[in-house]
């Protein structure tokens, strides 16, 4: 949808928070297959892919220093075949990183392919059973505090018309607001080469890290931060703003800079204020107040729990 009006975005967003709506995003998928695929991924990913509780899990792919190379979803197709799903444009980074330690191992890692993900969202207070499955797609649960719905990953667009899977199609702007409102981090915004996993939030760690599996690349820093109660130096927080702002605007406490905005979404009228995710100092906690400097304007902002504003 090209340049939808504020009213359209507002209506779409309220659908996502009530009866439901569908958004479509592009994803990169990488196939990992071979007799050693499970063992190799087990040593590279933060999740226990050998003993997965379901067919899909979220996981971190970390560097040796414990910082984030990628946050991705792992789909197990069978004992020797996996798909790694990551945000559009990050597939090449995942492939390069995985091949870095691929020595004398019976594993084939494909080049990234583009797939479409139908993100179906509705109110967490709404009871809906199942999802409409038509063709060649993987059906998985969404991630995020108080997020409700289902994800449909379309692997073969030629066999499945994505439009046949969608109900009420919402704008990308409303889907982005939903992501920010639920504190869901994004590669390149909240998650960068300078981010450690714990900064994304305790719920992200719970969804993406196994503390009972064997060793994996980057494990030491994750385990050390967990042993300290996940008291990270720069947590990602959700802010409710009094004015519209921009990525990179500074977050202030008592006039001192404590961080900056990493993702923003503008106000949409009464009851739908501007929201932002920010990487800030550890002293900034939900329930507190900060200020945001946007240009020459300094305005107050509230720090809230993810999922509390939708």
Image (tube, rainbow, N blue to C red):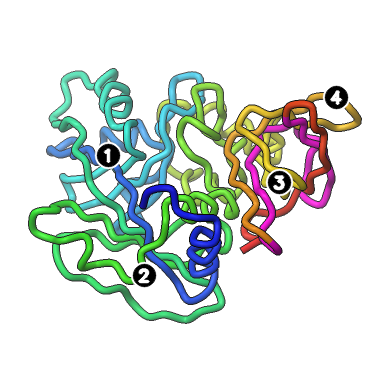
Rendered residue at 60%/54% (across/down): 181
Q: x%, y% of residue 13?
A: 52, 62
x, y percentage for residue 37?
A: 20, 37
Q: Residues within 10 Å of mark 1 (few under 14, many from 20)?
A: many
- The first of marks 2 and 4 along the sequence is 2
Frontmost of labels 2 and 4 is 2
Disc ID at residue 168:
2
Task: Quickly name the residue at label 3.
Answer: 239
User: In 3D space, how far apart are the residues under numbered discs 1 and 3 (Cα atoms)?
Assistant: 30 Å
Mark 2 and mark 1 lie on one chain; the one further toward the N terminus is 1
Q: Nearer the viewer, mark 2 or mark 1?
A: 2
Image quadrant containing the C terminus: bottom right
Mark closer to the observer (1, 3): 3
**Secondary structure at numbered mark 4:** strand
Q: Residues within 10 Å of mark 3 (few under 14, many from 20)?
A: many
Q: Residue at x 29, y 32 (%)?
A: 91
Task: Please tell me whether mark 2 sits on a helix, a strand or a loop.
Answer: loop
Query: How far apart are labels 2 and 1 at the CA level?
Result: 24 Å
- The reply to whether the C-beta atoms of the residues labelled 3 and 2 are less than 8 Å apart is no
User: What secondary structure is marked by label 1?
Assistant: strand
Question: In 3D space, how far apart are the residues under numbered discs 3 and 4 (Cα atoms)?
Answer: 17 Å
Upstream in sequence: badge 1 or badge 4 = 1
Q: Is residue 266 left or right of residue 102?
A: right
Residue corresponding to mark 4 = 256
User: Bounds of the magenta span?
Assistant: 270-294
The residue at the point 45 percent across, 71 percent down is 20
Across and down, in percent, residue 22 comes to: 37, 64
Q: CA distance from mark 2 to mark 4?
A: 45 Å
Examine the structure image and report whether residue 94 is included in the region drawn in magenta: no
User: Cβ–Cβ below 8 Å for labels 1 and 4?
Assistant: no
Q: Position of residue 70 (x, y in %)?
A: 41, 32
Residue at mark 1: 28
């Amino acid at each position: 949808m090209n340049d939808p009006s504020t009213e359209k975005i507002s209506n779409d967003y309220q659908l996502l928070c009530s009866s439901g709506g569908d958004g479509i995003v592009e994803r990169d998928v990488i196939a990992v297959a071979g007799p050693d695929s499970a063992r190799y991924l087990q040593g590279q990913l933060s999740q226990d892919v050998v003993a997965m509780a379901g067919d899909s899990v979220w996981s971190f792919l970390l560097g040796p220093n414990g910082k984030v190379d990628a946050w991705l979803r792992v789909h197990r197709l069978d004992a020797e075949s996996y798909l790694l799903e990551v945000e559009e444009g990050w597939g090449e980074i995942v492939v390069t990183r995985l091949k870095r330690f691929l020595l004398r191992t019976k594993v084939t890692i494909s080049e990234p392919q583009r797939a479409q993900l139908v993100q179906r969202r509705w109110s967490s207070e709404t009871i809906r059973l199942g999802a409409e499955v038509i063709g060649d797609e993987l059906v998985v649960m969404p991630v995020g505090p108080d997020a409700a719905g289902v994800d449909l990953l379309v692997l073969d667009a030629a066999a499945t018309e994505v439009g046949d899977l969608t109900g009420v199609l919402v704008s990308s702007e409303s889907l982005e607001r939903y992501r920010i409102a639920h504190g869901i981090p994004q590669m390149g915004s909240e998650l960068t080469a300078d981010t450690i996993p714990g900064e994304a939030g305790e719920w992200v760690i719970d969804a993406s890290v196994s503390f009972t599996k064997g060793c994996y690349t980057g494990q030491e820093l994750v385990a050390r931060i967990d042993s300290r109660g996940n008291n990270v130096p720069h947590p990602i927080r959700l802010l409710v703003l009094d004015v519209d702002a921009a990525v990179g605007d500074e977050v202030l406490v008592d006039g001192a800079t404590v961080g900056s905005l990493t993702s923003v979404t503008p106000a949409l009228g009464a009851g739908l204020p501007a929201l932002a995710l920010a990487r800030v100092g550890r002293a900034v906690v939900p329930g507190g107040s900060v200020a945001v400097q946007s240009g020459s304007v300094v305005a107050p902002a509230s720090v809230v729990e993810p999922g509390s504003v939708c």
